Image (tube, helix red, strand yellow):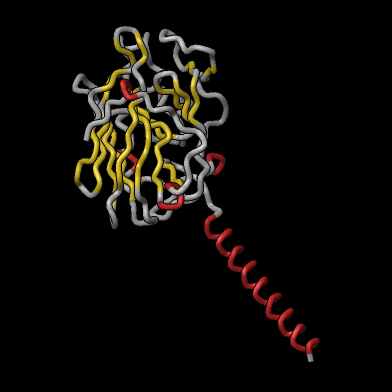
Amino acid sequence: MHKSKNRRRSIKLKFANICTLIVLLVIGLTFSVYAAKDDCTNLDGDGAKPVKEVGKEADATQNDYDEVVEEDDRNGVTYLSFIGGSQPKPNKCGLSPKNPEAEWTGWGGPIDADNATIGEGAGTRNHIVIGGIYFERGIGSHSVATVVYDLSGDKYLKFEGYVGMSDEKDPAECGHGGSGEFTFSVDGKQVFKSEVLQGTDGGKNVDAVHVEFDIPTNAKELEIIMGNGGDGAGCDHSAIGDAKLLNAQALAVEPANKLPTIWGHLKDSY
């Protein structure tokens, strides 16, 4: 009698363990997708002006850097992309714009690469460096540009990124490496606008400006306008480093590689 009860108890325990394993497997499959740069349409090679890691970046040198912001591989991170992404539901590369490609850049198009600057047009793109910081992920364009992203594919809670002018033009070209401002709107309501940013100011690189804002529940679209700074579009090679949308799963985990907040360098305005 005791053997029969023990056998039934053993069968129940095995069944419970199998059910637990199935649940864990389903959860793993559901939440295993994370941002992956390798799934994007990336530059084939080092770019027209190869980036260079140095001990201390020099203001007079284009595309050198002494800090790196690596890809954020937390589950629940969706990067903004151009070519390799999809919409409205993102893929591993990220989320691509929903508006016409002709609006994505004011010059140097059509855009043909993710995680790259505009360069001098097709075949001359570069990796993204802003203010001496190399960003593994991001989008690069040229003023005046408008990109619109469909937010209906996930329950996004926050946007984060760093805006500025690409180091590929400063300081020797156009006097100050171009200028521009960045305006972010959610469902037609402005949520962030930078001041006019130059590539260099007084011969010194201008820091990338941190952008961070919440995404309202049931938001439909994110619009980003890269302006020309009010002085024409010459040399306005705009870039947004580490441009990403975060859902609750991503926000539950602290990122492994995050720039320290230097309050004197932040120029956020809401």
Q: Quadrant of residue 260?
A: top left
Between 118 and 265, which is closer to the camera in this rendering?
Answer: 265
Give the x, y percent position of residue 234: 28, 19
Between 158 and 37, which is closer to the camera in this rendering?
Answer: 158
The residue located at (29%, 55%) in the rendering is 217
Left or right, 257 with reference to 169: right
* Above/below status of 196 relative to 58: below
Between 15 and 208, which is closer to the camera in this rendering?
Answer: 15
Give the x, y percent position of residue 114: 46, 36
The residue located at (45%, 46%) in the rendering is 77
Q: Residue furthest front?
A: 2
Q: Quadrant of the N terminus?
A: bottom right
* Above/below status of 3 relative to 65: below
Q: Quadrant of the C terminus?
A: top left
The residue located at (67%, 71%) in the rendering is 17
Total numbered labels placed on residues in the image? 0
The residue located at (32%, 34%) in the rendering is 211
Asked whether the viewer can see residue 258, the reply is: yes
Give the x, y percent position of residue 109: 37, 32
Left or right, 77 with reference to 203: right
Asked whether the viewer can see residue 144, the reply is: no
Give the x, y percent position of residue 156: 36, 51
* Above/below status of 155 relative to 235: below
Q: Residue furthest bottom?
A: 1
